[in-house]
Image (cartoon, grey):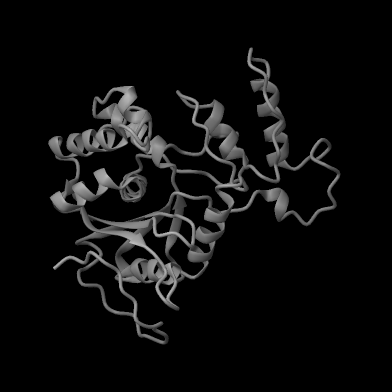
Amino acid sequence: MRKRKVSVSKVKTNQPPRPPAVKMADVVRFIGVSIAGGKSDKACVAILEYYPQNKKIFLSRLFEKIKSEGEISGDLKIHELISQDDQTVKYIAFDAALSLPQCLTCKLKCPGYELCKEPHIEWMWKHFREYKKGKKPVKLFTPYTQRAVEMYFQTKLEEKFDIHHAMGANSAPLMARAMYIKNHLPAGLECIEVYPKLTMWRLGESLGLVKSTLKDHRAAFGGDESREKFIHALSEKNIAFIYHQDAKSMIENSHAFEAFLCGMTAFLKYKNLVEPRPKNFPKSEAWIDFPIKGIKL
């Protein structure tokens, strides 16, 4: 029987690791986490399973509206869901930043970013100066709130994706929560950042969906229809198996849908179907994984 609700009665400590239910060669798992504020009930976790022998990807479990109850935090619930059968988990994908802007962690004496010669700051200046040559006015970047990858997403892709700054007013609490959860995971579990909107855009194009459908998946009006069309196309082309109840949940709940998109991006990374870091991109800067252009599934 598949679980629908998460219930944690107490904190478990000093538990010996459980043997995996199946061998690693038989199944590879990917976990997508759509994070939300720690005091809300919107966080969702999607667990996808890939069977290499059959070359099939399944959405095996979907957990919605994970919230704190009594003295048990929603963070602990997410942690325990991720830690189940973690021997077979390849990637855990979050839809929030997993690192601070480097200016906030830099130990050097700061001359101000107008004079700074650190590689990521020099990249930001070069990027800014190239972009401001256009017709539209451009606001100066703020390296203590944003990272190079957020500037890249705004200008270097086929469409402009206005991804929030890592330390933006709405995204900073999500980053803090995601980093907290990441820091408490078992050693060896690899976490990646994902931008679900871009994942849907790239996958949706390969599925033949129109742009209006791909842009509106979170809209209050029409968002559910966009999600339904996307899920239907995935199923019709036999790309991913999704149980009817899970499909219904994702159509009704955009956070559940985005948790699934995070998991799908993790799977695509495993298949080497995500964009590599650009050659001139600062090596010390974080990167966000997203599907390659013109992906064929």
Residue 196: where, in percent of width, then height? 39, 41
Residue 286: where, in percent of width, then height? 56, 47
> Is residue 64 shown left or right of residue 281?
left
Q: Is any atom of residue 229 visible in this view? A: yes
Q: Nearer the viewer, residue 54 or 237?
A: 237
> Is residue 38 shown left or right of residue 295?
right
Residue, x 44% and y 49% (percent of image)? 95
Q: Nearer the viewer, residue 187 or 235?
A: 235
Q: Is any atom of residue 243 visible in this view? A: no
Q: How many marks?
A: 0
Q: Quadrant of the C terminus?
A: top left
- In which quarter of the view is residue 82 placed? bottom left
Residue, x 82% and y 35% (percent of image)? 114
> Is residue 188 shown left or right of residue 22?
right
Q: Is residue 190 above or below residue 84?
A: above
Q: Is residue 77 above or below residue 292?
A: below
Residue 47: where, in percent of width, then height? 28, 58
Q: Quadrant of the N terminus?
A: bottom left
Residue 124: where, in percent of width, then height? 68, 34
Q: Nearer the viewer, residue 279 or 89?
A: 89
Q: Residue furthest bottom?
A: 14
- In which quarter of the view is residue 9 placed? bottom left
Q: Nearer the viewer, residue 180 or 119?
A: 180
Q: Residue furthest top?
A: 135
